[in-house]
Image (cartoon, rainbow, N blue to C red):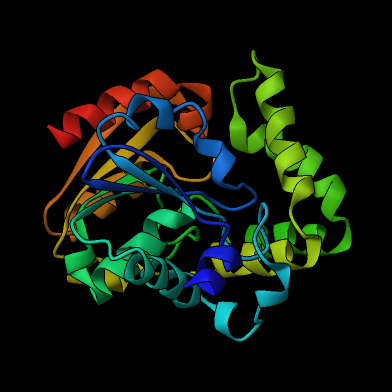
Amino acid sequence: MQDILRRNNVKVIGHGKPFMIFAHGFGCDQNTWRHIVPAFEKDYTIVLFDYVGAGNSDLTAYDEMRYSNLNGYAEDVLEICRELKINDAIFVGHSVSSMIGTLAAIAEPTFFSKLLFVSPSPCYKNDNGYSGGMESNDLEDLLEVMDSNYLGWSQSMASVVMGNADKPELGQALANSFCSTDPEIAKQFARVTFMSDTRSQLQNLTVESRTLQCVEDPLAPTEVGAYIQEHTPENSMVILSATGHCPHLSSPMEIIKQLEVFLN
C-alpha cells in the first residue's frame, strides 16, 4: 500500500464520507486543484495524486512500457482506489485525465458514482468528419518541437493552452508547471496524450458523466464536447462561459458551481 501511495504522492484530506478524486492533466500536478478543493473538503474525503513523472511522484517507478498508453495511467487510478478501499467516488478529471478516468470506470465501475470531465478530448486529431482540433501534421510538428526544445516549447505552449491573454500570470504559472515536470517523461506522456484515441471506448462507460466544455478551447473545440455527449451513455454537457483549456485555474468559481450542481 505504501509503495502505491508513495509512487503517486497520494494525499487524502477532508472529512466527509463520500470520496472525491481529482486527477490532473498533462504538464500539471495535484496542485492544479488548489482553488477547487477547499470548497469540498468539508463534505467529502478528497483524494489528490500525481501521475508518475509529475509533481512529487516517484520517478523511479516510471515504466515506459506500462505508460505507453492511457491504460497504464488508468491502472494507477484503479490501484489507488483499491488501496484506499474506495467505492462510489466522484472522479473529477482535467483534459486527458477525463479519458483516463473513463478507462478506469469502464474497467471497475463500482469504484465510481459520477465522472466530471473538465475540458476533455477522446481524440485531438481531425479524422473523417470528426473535429478534434488539430490536423495530423500539426500534431507531429508540435511533438517534434517538444522533443527538440522542451523548455522553449513549455514557455510558448503554456500561454496558448491557458488562453486568457488578459491574465498573463496564469500562462506563466502553467509554463512553470510544465518546466517542473521531468522532461523525458513529459515528452512521452505528451505523445501518449495527443496521439490517443478513446472514441471507441465512450460507448462502454456506464457511470454517469458530465462534460464541462469551455466556449473557446484551443485544444478541445465545442464539437468535441458534443461528440462525447452523443456517444457516451448517461453523459450531459455544459458550455462554460470560461475560455482556454484550464477553467479550474482561470475560472475556478464556475467549476465549483457546476460541480455542486452535478453532485446535487
Seen as rendered, the residue at the extreme top is 166
- Given residues 2 and 90, the one toward you in this image is 2
Residue 142 percent across, percent down from the top left: 71, 57
Quadrant of the rendered structure where residue 58 is?
bottom right
Count up the numbered dots.
0
The image quarter containing residue 175 is top right
Residue 247 on image: x %, y %: 46, 30
Residue drawn at the location 25% of the way across and 66% of the way down = 202
63 w.r.t. 182: above or below:
below
Vertical relation: 114 (above or below) 128? above
- 171 relative position to 198: left or right: right
Q: Name the residue located 28 percent from the left edge and 72 percent from the top edge.
A: 201
Question: Where does the C terminus fall, quadrant-wise?
Answer: top left
Given residues 31 and 46, the one toward you in this image is 46
Q: Quadrant of residue 184?
A: bottom right
* Relative vertical location of residue 149 with respect to residue 256 in this rendering, above or below: below
Q: Is residue 86 left or right of residue 72?
A: left
Q: Residue at x 72, y 68 (%)?
A: 59
Of 211 and 93, nearer the camera is 93
| Residue drawn at x 58%, y 39% as measured from the top left | 31
Position of 124 compared to 68: left or right? left
Residue 44 visible in image: yes
Residue 130 visible to an observer of this rendering: no
Query: Residue 84 placed where, x, y %?
Result: 35, 63
Residue 236, image x, y percentages: 17, 43
